[in-house]
Image (cartoon, coloured by chain):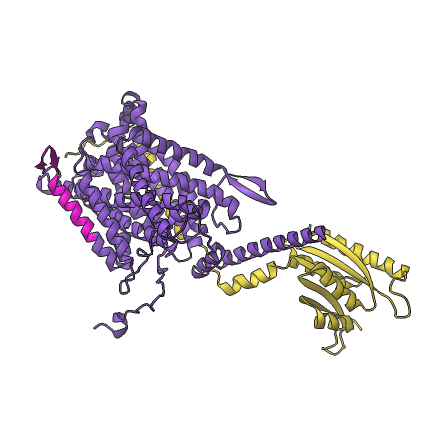
């Protein structure tokens, strides 16, 4: 029998803003990120293999090194500013409203594509499972629509999944987080099993060396492959998104974030290396939608079970990844509307479920529209991957610039984690730690952005077009608010930071922050007094 | 899809081992979080760490020298500045700027000893010697002048003295000090 309390719903007082609850644990925080990033390899392995050929693991390593730097930058910023909004919030604080909006729109593009790409990939793996068990190939069941052949069953399945995720997210975070955590744990064990048994039972070093030597791609293909490889690392943003709901974020976020960065990097590197040592790269062509299942099925002794199991798990983990796209898009728009970059129409939380229902609906439906459009192109996954890479690299470039800028403009916020390798530099009476790795990371991710623009025919058009469309909205919205598009609204970041740290119960950081501010105020006061005495 | 034949290589086994080791280490590190420190404990620690300028009145007595050592230990973590104060008490029968060579010499000696104690802790130190009608007035004047966060005083009290008897200077400083006062009451033989 249900108790009276369990059925009670606290109605918000009119005008009161409902805040996101802080109930994410260590495993929850890690899984929030893993649900997004961990699944990327399922979608990326086949795509990168088709592009980077015998150098696939080198392409993953190159993109992975840039990703480690991105990860460390996010770790520093998410632990310093544990609020929802992620890269968009960091850019807003570092570079102001305009660039904050540009970063937000780039990341929104990624989240909507995240929904589309992973829903499509998830259903690709589901179809592979059906293929393993019944021999029926649902993926390639197509319907002719004029000159275009649409893979109708695959499209319908993907749209159905997006609809289910919308419903799940409107119901609330707790249910979907638990779902993520269980499936994520099973996935880690399965991926590890595939790698370990693949290495022990089927891996041939001579095949890997042969592919490195004789199947190395042209520079153009390698650039395309490494820029696609970055999509296997997209989603780290999710940990930052969840920071506002994480218990003890300054302690937990650096640990979960660094662990996530390295586990995902290790998985990507090992999967590509194991694949090249078991199968020739061209065996993966045509298997972009179920590459991991193909690899698992080729492991001796285990393959007969591992293939279908990996397909089932791929379908689940990719569905979770699509789910985390829904969650992150809604949290990002919630944050953007809270800071006046979007209309406060978005900033409404459902009084019963306490979830931002409008943003969940709108951006998931955009994801659904992208899914439909991608099925009109020759390869839905390649099309979505193209756009995914553009949004991610643009957003990350802005985050790196913000990281460097914030070291100068906000040296007072305590940083429980700092990117390693800093050079001390005296700047207006203060010593600032200039992040060398941050500068290298910025150059690295800019290079990948350049590769995307150079080698992705669709990404270089659709990506900027999305950002421009968002900027047109921004121009209209700011005009309606009588605020100049390029100006930055004054905000009391210090009070907000104190509020955030108090809410997060990060007492050490709170006291450090207050002390740093008091010392700064004292300096300003004494400098002012000195000037007055000098003048008199 | 069919499996391939079993291929065992030592490099593959080594890589598998590296993989398992790396993953286990990462997860072990992630789950071993430092314990939660309650707000009250953080605040208490901070209030002591916030003491960055410590004033210590010195005279040539063991309790006063112990006070210097105590002050150094209080300020060690935050590298506090130690301000040593010697007050020359000028009788009312003399003008305040009267020279008191014997007291000045004794003061210099007391300050030198105290400075040596501070230098052993590698803390920044300054010595001040000022005239005043009463020691307490001088100490309180210096406290304000130096914007001290805390006064650390050592007082020798005879073993058989009444518990409330701390001496006129200590009592006056405790009553009128604008900042925190740490008093080290050292029992001495009668």
Write the residue at 25% across / 47% down.
A322
User: Up-down: is A352 above or below B26?
Assistant: below
Write the residue at 29% across / 62% down.
A354
Closer to the camera, A487 or A520? A487
Q: Tell me if A507 is positioned left or right of A2 in this view.
A: right
In the rendered image, residue A143 lying in the magenta stretch gets the answer yes
Closer to the camera, A185 or A327? A327
Residue B71 position, x and y percent, is: 69, 60
The chain painted purple is A
Q: Colour of chain B?
A: yellow
Q: How many marks?
A: 0
Q: Tell me if B50 is positioned left or right of A193 in this view.
A: right
Q: Give residue B18's quadrant in the image.
A: top left
Question: Does residue B40 show up?
Answer: yes
Write the residue at 48% across / 56% down.
A492
Considering every residue shown, the one lying at the far bottom of the view is: B162
Q: Which residues are magenta?
A: A142-164
Q: Tell me if B91 is positioned left or right of A406 in this view.
A: right
In the rendered image, residue A198 lying in the magenta stretch gets the answer no
Closer to the camera, A54 or A413? A413
Residue A173 position, x and y percent, is: 29, 57
Residue A43 position, x and y percent, is: 24, 39
Question: Does residue B10 show up?
Answer: no
Residue A109 position, x and y percent, is: 29, 43
Is the N terminus of chain A in the top left, top right, bottom left or bottom right quadrant? bottom left
């Amino acid at each position: 029998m249900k108790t009276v309390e369990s059925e009670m719903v606290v109605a918000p007082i009119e005008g009161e803003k409902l805040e996101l609850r802080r109930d994410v644990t260590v495993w929850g925080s890690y899984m929030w990120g893993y649900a997004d990033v961990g699944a990327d390899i399922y979608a990326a392995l086949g795509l990168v293999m088709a592009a980077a050929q015998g150098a696939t693991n080198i392409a993953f390593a190159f993109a992975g090194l840039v990703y480690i730097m991105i990860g460390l930058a996010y770790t520093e910023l998410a632990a310093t500013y544990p609020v929802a909004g992620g890269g968009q919030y960091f850019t807003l604080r570092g570079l102001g409203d305009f660039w904050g909006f540009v970063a937000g729109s780039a990341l929104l593009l990624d989240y909507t594509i995240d929904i589309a790409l992973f829903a499509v990939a998830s259903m690709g793996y589901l179809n592979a499972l059906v293929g393993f068990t019944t021999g029926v190939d649902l993926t390639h069941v197509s319907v002719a629509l004029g000159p275009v052949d649409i893979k109708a069953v695959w499209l319908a399945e993907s749209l159905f999944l997006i609809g289910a995720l919308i419903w799940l997210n409107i119901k609330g975070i707790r249910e979907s987080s638990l779902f993520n955590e269980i499936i994520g744990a099973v996935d880690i064990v399965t991926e590890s099993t595939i790698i370990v048994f693949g290495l022990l039972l089927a891996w041939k070093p001579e095949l890997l060396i042969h592919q490195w030597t004789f199947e190395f791609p042209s520079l153009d293909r390698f650039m395309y492959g490494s820029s696609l490889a970055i999509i296997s690392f997209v989603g780290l943003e999710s940990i930052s998104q969840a920071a506002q709901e994480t218990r003890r974020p300054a302690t937990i976020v650096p640990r979960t974030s660094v662990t996530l960065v390295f586990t995902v990097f290790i998985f990507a590197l090992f999967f590509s290396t194991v694949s090249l040592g078991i199968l020739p790269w061209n065996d993966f062509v045509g298997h972009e939608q179920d590459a991991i299942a193909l690899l698992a099925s080729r492991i001796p002794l285990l393959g007969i079970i591992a293939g279908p199991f990996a397909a089932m798990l791929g379908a689940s983990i990719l569905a979770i990844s699509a789910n985390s796209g829904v969650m992150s898009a809604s949290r990002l728009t919630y944050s953007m509307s809270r800071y006046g970059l979007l209309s406060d129409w978005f900033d409404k939380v459902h009084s019963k479920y306490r979830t931002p229902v409008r943003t969940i609906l709108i951006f998931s439906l955009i994801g659904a529209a992208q899914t439909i459009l991608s099925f009109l192109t020759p390869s839905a996954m390649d099309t979505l991957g193209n756009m995914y890479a553009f949004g991610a690299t643009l957003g990350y470039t802005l985050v790196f610039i913000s990281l460097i800028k914030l070291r100068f403009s906000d040296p007072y916020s305590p940083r429980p984690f700092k990117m390693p390798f800093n050079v001390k530099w005296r700047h207006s009476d203060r010593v600032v730690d200039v992040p060398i790795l941050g500068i290298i990371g910025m150059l690295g991710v800019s290079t990948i952005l350049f590769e995307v623009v150079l080698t992705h025919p669709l990404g270089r058009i659709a990506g900027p077009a999305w950002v421009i469309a968002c900027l047109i909205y921004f121009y209209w919205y700011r005009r309606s608010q009588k605020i100049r598009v390029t100006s930055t609204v004054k905000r009391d970041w210090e009070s907000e930071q104190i509020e955030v740290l108090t809410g997060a119960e990060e007492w050490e950081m709170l006291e450090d922050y207050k002390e740093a501010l008091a010392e700064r105020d004292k300096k300003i006061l004494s400098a002012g007094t000195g000037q007055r005495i000098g003048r008199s | 899809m069919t499996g391939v034949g079993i291929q065992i290589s030592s490099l593959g086994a080594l890589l598998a081992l590296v993989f398992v080791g790396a993953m286990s280490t990462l997860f072990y590190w992630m789950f071993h979080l430092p314990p939660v420190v309650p707000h009250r404990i953080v605040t208490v620690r901070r209030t002591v760490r916030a003491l960055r300028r410590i004033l210590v009145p010195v005279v040539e007595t063991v309790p006063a020298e112990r006070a210097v050592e105590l002050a150094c230990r209080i300020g060690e973590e935050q590298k506090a500045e130690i301000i040593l104060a010697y007050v020359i008490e000028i009788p009312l029968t003399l003008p305040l700027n009267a020279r008191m060579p014997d007291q000045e010499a004794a003061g210099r000696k007391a300050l030198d000893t105290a400075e040596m104690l501070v230098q052993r802790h590698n803390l920044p130190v300054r010595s001040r010697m000022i005239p005043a009608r009463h020691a307490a007035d001088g100490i309180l004047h210096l406290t304000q002048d130096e914007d001290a966060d805390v006064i650390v005083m050592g007082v020798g009290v005879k073993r058989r003295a009444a518990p409330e008897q701390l001496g006129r200077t200590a009592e006056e400083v405790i009553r009128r000090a604008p900042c925190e006062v740490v008093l080290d009451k050292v029992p001495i033989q009668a």
